[in-house]
Amino acid sequence: MKPFAMLAPLLFLTLFTTGQQLPLLKISDNQRYLETADGQPFFWLGDTAWELLHRLNKAEIDRYLQDRADKGFTLIQTVILAELDGLNSPNAQGATPLIDNNPEKLNEAYFEHVDYLMEKASELGLYVGLLPTWGDKFNRRWGAGPEIFTPENAATYGELLAKRYHNHSNLVWILGGDRAMENETHYEIIRAMAQGIRAHDQRHLLTFHPVGGKKATDFFSEDAWLQLDMFQSGHSRLAKDYQYVLDARNLRRTRPVINGEPRYENIRDRFWEDRAYGWLDDADVRVAGYWTMLSGAAGYTYGCNDIWQMYSSKHEPVINARTGWQEALDLPGSKQMGYLKNILSALPWQELQLDQRLLLGDNPEDTSHRLLARTERGDLLLAYTPTGMPLHLDLPKLDAETVSAYWFNPRNGRVKAIGDLKTSSAHRFTPWASGWGSDFLLLLVDKAAGYDFSAFMD
């Protein structure tokens, strides 16, 4: 790894935390990843803050955004018309978003709060994945609703938002909001909103946040406006995040793939079932994150049950929220996602391709499923073991004669050298711990390639 590769993310952060406008995002030439307008790779490390605009005042927004910027996040996902009675329950400034719940009449007092978020996020080097509405406002399968959208007013609403925010460079539009398209009217509403946005904004990327267990392309695969394929792998330890990415890669049209809502930290596992499976934790966050990125995704969005709803004692807890959002900022999973971004950003992660051929022996299709990814030129191999199962690798399949081996610890972001190995025979790599929570990332690099992990070592 060249020294400038380690410095580039820091220089990027320094440049754009001084109040300068962030560069627009675009899709890479190979249609697989995101870049800034000047061609720099963009690592989508999102955080789920659905109720931010609805429940936080400006000082609280400042605290939240600063924390996420400090931890290495690059994008915040939030909603204008929020899920938890976002139409009729005023926000922290005492304003509701629409006049008479009419999408064609924006309440200026509420949208000044949205303006503040966009500007403050930009100051801190953060992009905003902005949902115009949560899905219960057009498909009240569950939630407060009410359903207020028609294809006609959805188009107007999209136009109003686009006119207001098209000059903000730190923006990604996300339609949908945790809903399936269950009838033709639902499709018409989403397409009309996209058309309204595109009538005044051709600059910003546009995607769709689907219901759990689905991808955006399960509903809109042929729609030209859908630029990113976002999926929701959902809140289950049984979720196979990598499979969504692989399925998206098999589609006729290639798009960057984003895991927009994986299993949350500090939420009941499979909370919708009438059975106790325990609670999801930071190990769930790490497994979902590494599975997502090593399988070829362009980004991953962390989530925490207490933070998405901005839970505090003055609110009723949703899905058994049990920790205040300000305390939950320091749960370990969010910081560990910064470690994930750090190690991948120090490598040519956009060039990695899933390649399971080097793994010898059985690979269980459960929480211990191991993933291998390497560059096409063969100078770098990453192998992830979620529960510390050994990695028996067929090293003769590598092009290099000698590799340098390292363990990366996803819990503390540090690298431990294993040593140099000849690739003339297979080798078994065994982490120093095993069981749930004992995940490890193996790094194998061509000794002649010049990679340097000294910055990650004690």
Image (spheres, rainbow, N blue to C red):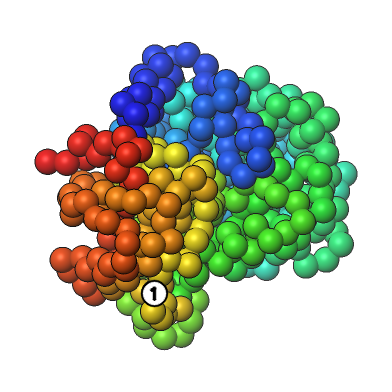
Secondary structure at badge 1 equals loop
Residue 268 screen position, x and y as percent: 38, 71
- Residue at 39%, 53% (x, y): give it: 381
**Identity of the residue drawn at 68% across and 68% down:** 141
Q: Position of residue 412 (x, y in %)?
A: 21, 49
Residue 23 placement, left or right of 271: right
Q: Looking at this view, is 164 or 29 the one in front? A: 29
On the picture, is 53 further left or further right than 158? left
Q: Quadrant of residue 446?
A: top left
Q: Residues within 10 Å of mark 1 (few under 14, many from 20)?
A: some
Q: Is residue 10 above or below residue 255?
A: above
Q: Quadrant of the N terminus?
A: top left
Q: Which of the pair 260/287 is nearer the observer? A: 287
Taking depth in this image into account, of 341 and 301 the one nearest to the observer is 341
Count every numbered label the image shows and give the total: 1
The answer to which of 269 and 364 lies nearer the viewer is 364
Which residue ends up furthest to the left in the rendered image? Answer: 458
Q: Quadrant of the C terminus?
A: top left
Q: Position of residue 320 (x, y in %)?
A: 38, 68
Q: Is residue 91 above or below residue 3?
A: below
Evaluate whether residue 132 shows in this view: no
Residue 350 is at least partly visible in this image: yes
Q: Residue at x 28, y 67 (%)?
A: 427
**Residue 408 appears left or right of 369:** left
Q: Amino acid at mark 1?
A: Leu
Rendered location of residue 299, percent (x, y): 51, 46
Vertical placement of residue 365 versus 191, above or below: below
Give the residue pinned by disc 1. Answer: 360
Tell me which residue sits at (52%, 48%) in the image: 376
Quadrant position of residue 74: top left
